[in-house]
Amino acid sequence: MKIELKLGKAEELKSEALALGLFEAQGLSKEAKLLDKRLDGAISLLLKNGDFGGKANQTAVLYPKGFEFKRIILIGLGKKEEFSLDRIRQAAGTAYKKAKKLKIKNYVSFLHGKGQKGIDFEASAQAVTEGTLLSAYHLDQYKTEGKEDLFEVESMTIWDEDRTKKSAIEKGMKTGEISSWGTNLARDMVNHPSNFMTPTRMAEIALNLAKEYKFRCEILSPPDLEKLKMGALMAVAQGSKQPAKFIIMEHMPEKKRRGTVVLVGKAITFDSGGISIKPSEGMWEMKGDMAGGAAVIATMASAAREGIPVHLVGLVPATENLPSGTAYKPGDIIKSYSGKTIEIMSTDAEGRLILADALGYAQKYEPKALLDIATLTGACVIALGNVVAGLMGSDQQLLNKVKKAGEKTGERVWELPLYKEYEEQIKSDLADMKNSGGRPAGTITAAAFLKKFVGKAPWAHLDIAGMDWEEKGKPYIPKGPLGFGVRLFLQFLREWGRS
Ligand code: BES
Ligand code: MN
Ligand code: ZN
């Protein structure tokens, strides 16, 4: 799917459809009025009849006679007071879906909402691009039948009359293209089943991306992990035949601002729970327990492609968590990379173990920001559902920056209190700590565990357990993996590189 740009008069265009956004209860916009006039009042008639009211993501199609556009696809932008960048993404996603349903190969889209609520041409172009490309995501390589029925929209053309805005629009399109590409890359990794997406395959993907987009990538395998004494990662891996991998990526631009940012992502390519095995119903979803790692790999590739002026390191510990005769067991005491000992209460609290080693390893970069992302706790799904990710950490300024990036990208995060008292729950009689604090405040005690390994670095932790998979499908998020975190991280890094 390609996105193009055309500037100038409508009459110079010719296309199968034009996607035009309209606000709820606002009458016609300036652009819509011009069109309406040339269409003998067809749009105002539609509004008057009440068939289309501009409610968010509502659609209607007009078929004008002898016009440069075969169809006009009207899309509701919702109430003007509620308008936001996310509404633009949604409108663009809704337009794409409608175009696909109508089997349209190319359509033209307005820059929805530009000029509203301080949203400039660049931001609108970015949001329209993102909404379109994110909505176009699919993975069909596993289907051997019915492929001939699959229809692809070939291209979408952003159109505006104002030729002076060319570079602003192009800039937004470029940023939007990279963000969506990265997100869809992460979605693919999460979507693939665990018999394909093994730790070794994830390492290969990272290596290939590094080669293509010119960032450093080094893979540590079991003998290296042994040497480094990554005891927590090795303990989780010891029940599986798949060798664990520790993926180290580094983006070293010539121009770089501020200090080093380190991203850490949990990559359990399948989480059965291990000896503390999970119920079988819904267990397949645990193929997505590497969504954090996928987000980090995809962010590295996107940041390198874009040339974001930040020294960025990505660390992804990857392994399966399986029960077997060699698996680690409840009651075992293991020694982490940092030297701290951990008593295993549940082999299903494996994510924090592999993150402990990665966060410990991150110390050698002396990061000015250390961010981790993980499908860490079922408790986070209970607390926040599938609406927003959990956020905890040690540095309020950093947390505020993450929140801001979340608001801007629509990948929202909600802070939970990481009070000292929660540490009581993970105290162990035999070792330095336990790997589970039981059911109460499970999301926070998991973060309290991680906190023991972050050293002095300003740290933020994102629990995305509820944000790995979309059950129904939303305007620009098809049913399936979300790729959550990539756009948030990229926005965070762009800001970091600016200041
Ligand atoms: N990967 C799971 C968390 C999860 C649950 C992610 C549901 C997405 C959806 C994690 O490894 C896990 O099993 N956590 C346990 C921790 C408990 C044993 C302390 C949990 O949440 O039950
Ligand atoms: Mn688990
Ligand atoms: Zn897990």
Image (spheres, rainbow, N blue to C red):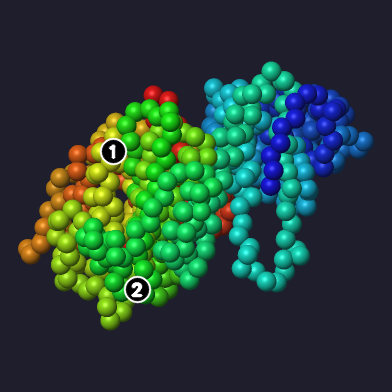
Earlier-in-chain disc, 1 versus 2: 2
User: Can residue 67 be seen at all in this image of the molecule?
Assistant: yes
Which percent across, then down, holds residue 322?
34, 73
Residue at 76% over, 65% down? 148
Q: Toward the viewer: 21 or 360? A: 360
Alpha carbon distance from label 1 to label 2: 32 Å
Which amino acid type corresponds to the residue marked 2 in the rendered image?
Answer: Ser
Quick one: label 1, few (<14), some, or many (20+) residues within 10 Å?
many
Kindly state the secondary structure of the residue where label 2 is placed. Answer: loop
Residue at 69% over, 18% down? 164
**Residue with the mark numbered 2:** 240
Q: Quadrant of the C terminus?
A: top left
Quick one: label 2, few (<14), some, or many (20+) residues within 10 Å?
some
Which percent across, then down, holds residue 491?
46, 35
Q: Quadrant of residue 456?
A: top left
Q: Toward the viewer: 24 or 480? A: 480
Q: Are marks 1 and 2 in contact (CB under 8 Å)?
A: no
Q: Residue furthest right?
A: 66
Residue at 40% over, 75% down? 280
| Residue 367, label in figure | 1
| Residue 257, label in figure | none
Residue at 63% over, 65% down? 141
- 48 vs 188, left or right, is right
User: Can residue 441 be seen at all in this image of the molecule?
Assistant: no
Which percent across, then down, holds residue 323?
31, 76
Which amino acid type corresponds to the residue marked 1 in the rendered image?
Answer: Pro
How many marks the image carries: the answer is 2
| Residue 469 vertical placement versus 53 (above, below) | below
Q: Residue furthest bottom?
A: 325
Query: Is the residue marked 1 within 8 Å of ligand 3, measured from its CB?
Result: no
| Residue 316 vertical placement versus 348 (above, below) | above
Q: Toward the viewer: 115 or 498? A: 498
